Amino acid sequence: MSVLSVRCVYALRAVVYTALQMRERPYISIRDMSEFLNMPFHFLTKVLQELTKKGVLSSSRGPAGGIALARPPEEITLMEIIEVVDGPAMFQHCLLGLEGCNDQKPCPLHRTWGPERERLKALFANTFVSDIINDAAQHYERMIFDNLPMPSRLKRKPRRKTVARRVKRRRTKK
């Protein structure tokens, strides 16, 4: 059982992957990310759009485009990512989803969940993406992609040369 939604877990993994990959290149291909993280492309794209609209990520079009962190990883907390994707409801509502659950009318889990919820909230608010990538630098595949099948090739297929380029080269060789 996960306290976070699948969308939120995908968002966290995608942001960490982006931060790790930005050490090698400025923009990360969403297609490559989707394949590497074993996530459905269109689902991942929608999650990344939300993060881009809220200023966590930035995007660039074109052959060398993709996504990048909009700010340094030292400025992005896990709480920010969670609230963009899942909203603050996890930290405000009853874990069982019961209406009217509060300190005066607690649900069966209220007294147990309340302190744990506050502890998780503090953990997410005080953990930055940089903390994760620094810890994960050597073991990130195991930590992020635990037991997921990894594609053997991540590089894009080379583009075919267009007819116009071939004709132009033939003319210049003569």
Image (cartoon, helix red, strand yellow):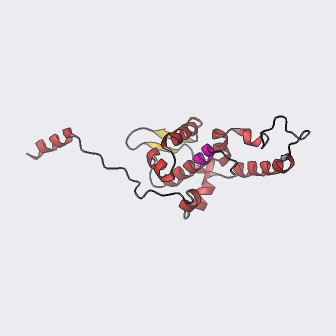
Magenta part mainly helix, strand or loop?
Answer: helix
Q: Residue 133 location, x and y as percent?
A: 58, 57
> Residue lying furthest left in this view?
174
Rendered image quadrant of residue 170: top left
> Quick check: 52 above or below 158?
above
23 left or right, relative to 51: left
Q: Position of residue 102 (x, y in %)?
A: 86, 39
67, above or below 19, in the image: above
Residue 78 x, y percent position in the rendering = 65, 48
Q: Nearer the viewer, residue 149 or 17?
A: 149
Toward the viewer: 59 or 106?
106
**Residue 25 drawn at (x, y percent):** 44, 51
Taking 131 as reference, is 97 above or below it?
A: above
Q: Is residue 149 left or right of residue 132?
A: left
Say if 35 sits above or below 62 in the image: below
Residue 12 or 171: which is nearer the viewer? 12
Residue 159 is a magenta residue: no
Residue 8 lies in the magenta-colored region: yes
Q: Residue at the far right: name it.
A: 104
Q: Quadrant of residue 100?
A: top right
Residue at image location 56% in from the left, 64% down from the top:
139
Q: Residue at x 84, y 51 (%)?
A: 112
Q: Is residue 49 left or right of residue 8?
A: left
Say which quadrant the C terminus sits in. Answer: top left
Does residue 64 appear left or right of residue 34 in this picture? Answer: left
Residue range (magenta) = 5-12
